[in-house]
Amino acid sequence: MKKSTKPLKTRDEREGSPWTGLGAVLTKEMADHLTGARMLILDALVVLTAVGTIYTALQNIRPGANNEFLYLRLFTTAQEPLPAFVFFLAILVPLIAIALSFDSINGEFNRRTLSRILAQPVYRDALLMGKFLGGLMTLTMVFSAIWLLIFGIGILRLGVPPTAEETGRALWFLLGTIFYGGIWMALAMLFSTVFRSSATAALASIAVWAFFIFFWNIVVGLVTPLLAPDQITNLEQLVAASQSQMVLTRISPLTLYADIATIMLQPTERFLGFVLPVQLDRAIEAPLPLAQSVLVI
Amino acid sequence: MSDLVLEAKGLTKQYGDFVAVDHLDLSIRRGEVFGLLGPNGAGKTTTILMLLGLTEPTGGEVSVLGFDPARQPLSVKKRVGYMPDQVGFYDDLTARENLIYIAKLNGIPRDQIKRRVEEAIERVRLSHVIDQRTATFSRGMRQRLGLADVLIKNPQLIIMDEPTQGLDPELAHEFLDLIHSLKTEGTTILLSSHLLHQVQAICDRVGLFSQGRMVLQGTVSELARKVLGGAYRIQLQAEGPAAKLRKALEGLRDVNAVEMNNGAIQIEAQKDVRADAAEAVIQAGGRLQGLSVEAQSLDDIYTRYFEEVRNEKVN
């Protein structure tokens, strides 16, 4: 029996990398996600909305013949009664992310596998991180597939290849979408560790989601007047008020995502939030290059 | 390094005001089977979690195989197999897939995984269902798969939490046989249980746990001597003059008490006095019809001990 070779320097130092076993957890989680029935349902849902909205968008785009940024408009064009694909994503992405991870930890607990896994030589960090990354990579695969699908349909129906600028913008948008999904996934995982029952965790995550979709704007609308002075007398106060409102709305990941989408997919947009007429005066009505749009975010 | 596989000194765990484990001293030698016994909620599981580094002790020191579980959990967990009280598996995976995952988490080299998994499953006699989904497994099969899961890393120490809980007597017996065969191969085993009679058969030493304290520790017969006084209980069936028989038996050395009830005689003795008793019966003119010694039962020790504790408290 060998005694431990090197004594640990400080009491707080842990031996070994926290990522030991990360790969194993990651592969297992991805395999689980990709073969699960849950995933099939979600995939079907997203593909359906994608195809549906793009179809209507294509119908809309055709007669218009304003052919700048055709591909980006695939994402954004809406036709009554169907909203644009971007809007669908803003709502669906959180749901998918939550659905993938709301039972990641407490599910293991309830199946009694958690203690068995933790008895293996891995840290909890590796388990959590592996689960998160596994989910995120699954999301990435799904979204990339949809993204390619949209471009594919676009090329078929529009008959013009997308420009580099368009591709770049759409790629950034894809990244934003994945990041957005990651936020919700992390939230669902947090609830999954806090609550023992997966149903509670799912409900809590969906409650947060609903709160941000339906109520956050109302809350902001109520709170900002309280923060602002009773009467707005000069320009500075007006700017301050609108800025505090913007900060508040941006607490919601939904708004942030919408902002990203707007800037990336609508090159003519160059400001987020409140803009003074003075600033607009000097602005040129022309689309921003990709790099500039990224800066705005 | 010494022969001690596990050593704990003054190990304490507090949850708020509640003391789950109170200054526990415990040492386990290589190759022995140690039983951690006590009622539910006595602190057995908490102790085990501390030994594995899954919870940090509030005070005291532990060393498992020379490592400190709180600081070097990976080294400990690589060498110690832990079987929780209720083993769960991923139901949608097969037995083989479940174990492969564990093997990967243990960092077993890729080219060895297949062989090690098959060996472990063979060991617990589940080879015929290796490619079945674990959802179809019975309680007993799950328990055995749980053991395979532990064996896959060739542990130097196996810790089992309530290994026979929820198994019917036959399955429990089968499982204890498995544990026994591990012991003969030199694996050190620490198991916790509240099912005393099952554990008694395979444990070299036991520790009685009560309210976070280890109240008694030693081999079963040591404990019996300590708690029961006369450790051996001998049953006799004999015909003959009762008074004479009683006198003859009470006159024997090491006999503490003789109880007679028609033909059935019960002797409490410090040693196994069966031979002497038989001789005494015959010399007293009796006819011996039956003779047996009752193994000291942990149940008795346990009940007696806690009765005494209770009486002391009352007094």
Image (spheres, coloured by chain):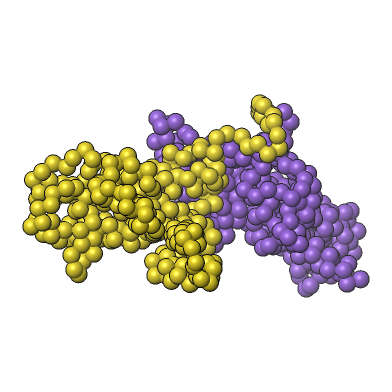
Q: Is residue B87 visible?
A: yes
Q: Is residue A54 left or right of residue B123?
A: left
Q: Vertical placement of B188 versus A279: above or below? A: above
Closer to the camera in the image, B136 or B90: B90
Q: Which chain is purple?
A: B
Colour of chain A, in one word, is yellow
x and y percent of residue A251 in the render? 47, 59
Q: Quadrant of residue B194?
A: bottom right
Closer to the camera in the image, B87 or A174: A174
Closer to the camera in the image, A172 or A69: A69
Residue displayed at 67% across by 42% down: B70
x and y percent of residue A19 in the render? 51, 38
Number of marks present in the image shown: 0
Q: Is residue B68 left or right of residue A168?
A: right
Closer to the camera in the image, B149 or A4: A4
Residue displayed at 28% across by 61% down: A88
Residue displayed at 70% across by 34% down: A10
Q: Quadrant of residue B189?
A: top right
x and y percent of residue B36 in the render? 69, 52
x and y percent of residue A163 in the render? 18, 40
Q: Is residue B221 visible?
A: no
Quadrant (top left, top right, bottom left, bottom right) of the C terminus of chain B: bottom right
Q: Is residue A297 left or right of residue B30?
A: left
Residue displayed at 81% across by 67% down: B307
Quadrant (top left, top right, bottom left, bottom right) of the N terminus of chain B: top right
